[in-house]
Image (cartoon, rainbow, N blue to C red):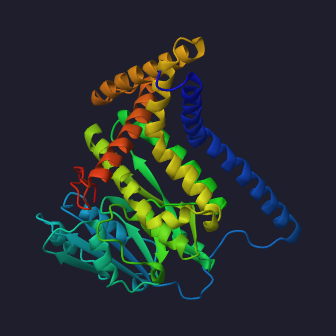
Amino acid sequence: MIFSTSAVKILFWISVGMVLYTYAGYPLLLFVFASLQQAFADLRFALRGGQRRQRWSGEVPPFVSIVFSAYNEEAVIEAKMRNCGVLDYPVERLEILVGCDGCSDRTAELARSVNLPNARIFEYSERSGKLDVLNRVMQQARGDIVVFSDANTLFDPGAVRSLLRRFSDPLVGCVCGELRLTPLDVGQKNESFYWRYEVFLKFLESRLNLLLGANGGIYAIRRELFLPLPKHAIIDDFLIAMQVHAAGYRVVYDPEAVAYEEASHAVQDEFRRRVRIGAGNFHAIRYTARLLSPTAGGIAFSFWSHKIFRWLVPFALPTAFLCALILARQPFYAVCSELGVALLAMALAGYHLELRKDLRSLFSIPYYFVSMNLALMLGFIRFLSGSQGSVWQRSARGKQPL
């Protein structure tokens, strides 16, 4: 044998340990630390009293810019603009900036047809990608606070006020809202299960000042903290939030700042989206690597635990499986290899049921777990090959009600 049995066992347990720590150990640590912190906060409140709910401290509400990029969004842009028009926020203290990224349809025309007095539509003749559009539009933003969104994301009427109250803390530089997916069919409930798991982690990380990224559909920053996004970057929300961390400000999560977005129409569309995000995650490391250093403080702990180790799971899983096959003469490792085969079989069954829009929870969760990690692996390959550009083909949109 090329490797000794002991070396294969060590590699097996390192791989399994990484998977278990990422999906179970890290959330458990967060829960324990956050519970202790909350207990101490409750004790301080009981002894000292005071106001626990944060409010904007100024007499005049801050001027707010809502910024988003749109590419061929004629199916949803009117609903988005009307949604911006009914937000519970003073119109004179709010502007809506829409960057049309080389649209070949009626996106800009329909956006203007809503006739919002505080909206400005910027048309760019050539498509350059979302991040480049954000860089351009941000040069026109006048708001003290900038709220980023997507063309297919609809805000709860009180979402902007909920985001703003957290900025009463001068150390808060970015506030992430809660994006709720509205599944189009039962076959997408498995994604909702994983989404709730991620929301739970965000809640705990925010409480401990360890929150990393934001939900692209609804998050806000102080305008002075925005730095032009790198030309060839792929994802904006993670990079912008990490820029805020690097500047010494906090990134927090507010579950009461709610927005809604439809899940992808097709399994293939959702998988392509995950591959692109995976490539963007690996690409972003070059701009955020300094936050992996222990000198970055607690944020390095969450960066390694929630991101880096998570991104390595697609490689740890097949490594553990191959090691189990090599060691299969021993009963324990034989069982582990059989479990690996069973996981793949259940994932394949879940995939076929998903295509038929038929949900079986026993199969859908293994399918989502395997497909998510496969997408990360393919994203890594695209990152290495440089084949994932900053401009991509968005998923088809269902027309939203006006």
Q: Is residue 134 visible?
A: yes
Q: Nearer the viewer, residue 96 or 174?
A: 174
Which of the 4 image quadrants contains residue 373? top left
Q: Residue furthest front?
A: 2
Is the C terminus in the top left, top right, bottom left or bottom right quadrant? bottom left
Which of the 4 image quadrants contains residue 41? bottom right
Q: Residue at 42%, 37% (x, y): give it.
A: 189
Q: Position of residue 18 (x, y in %)?
A: 56, 39
Q: Report the label total.
A: 0
Q: Residue furthest left?
A: 104
Question: Does 144 appear above or below 286?
Answer: below
Q: Nearer the viewer, residue 188 or 139?
A: 139
Q: Is residue 160 visible?
A: no
Q: Nearer the viewer, residue 251 or 143?
A: 251
Q: Position of residue 16 (x, y in %)?
A: 56, 32
Which of the 4 image quadrants contains residue 22? top right
Q: Nearer the viewer, residue 87 or 131?
A: 131
Q: Residue at 69%, 47% (x, y): give it.
A: 29
Q: Position of residue 157 (x, y in %)?
A: 45, 66
